Image (cartoon, grey):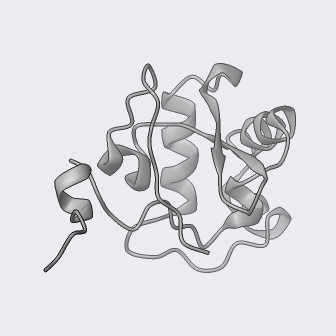
Amino acid sequence: MNIFIKLNDIFSVHGVGIITARDKLTIHFAKEQAFQLVSVFSTIKEEIARKVFKLREDTRDWEVKQAQQDLIESNVDIKKIVPWGKIRLSTCFSYYNNCFQPFSRLKINKNSPNVTIVRF
């Protein structure tokens, strides 16, 4: 007899969560630090950004130039820096922009609590 409820029956949206290969660029432990980085990254030349932030080659889903353009078009604003948990017992901050794939797929409702199950 199976007495457990399937997670698919509890959560209407499910997936792997947020995955980034550029943690030093996208994840910060202070809101102000995240905003400062986004502000700088969005205004410097692409080749300088690659060197300063030690970014490797572009991928199919992420390009430095496109990321910079998305930030510029979003009118960089500190109000778009949002908290989320990534590392045990810590809160991290990242820039929320509907153009970035992980966030646009999740369709986060920022006006209600997001319930998440995390496995360590």
- At 42% across and 46% down in the image, what residue appears? 103
Give how far across and how far down residue 31 sits, in percent: 80, 34
Q: Quadrant of residue 76?
A: top right
Query: Looking at the image, which is closer to me, 5 or 44?
Result: 5
Q: Position of residue 80 (x, y in %)?
A: 60, 27
Please identify the residue farthest to the left as the structure is shown.
Answer: 1
The answer to which of 93 and 1 lies nearer the viewer is 1
Query: Residue placed at 79% from the left, 52% from the top?
Result: 90
Q: Quadrant of the C terminus?
A: bottom right
Q: Residue at x 29, y 58 (%)?
A: 14
* Vertical arrangement, residue 55 with respect to residue 10, above or below: below
The reply, left or right, for residue 84 in relation to residue 69 is right
Quarter of the image with the N terminus in it = bottom left
Image location of residue 79, percent across then percent down:
65, 20
Q: Determine whether, in the image, residue 9 is placed left or right of residue 68.
A: left
| Callout count | 0
> 105 or 55, which is in the foreground?
105
Provide residue 7's location: percent of width, then percent of height: 26, 62
- Residue depicted at 54% across the width and 55% down the height: 65
Q: Nearer the viewer, residue 7 or 87?
A: 7
Up the image or down, 115 lies above or below 1; here it is: above
Apparent side of residue 50 relative to residue 36 in the rendered image (left or right): left
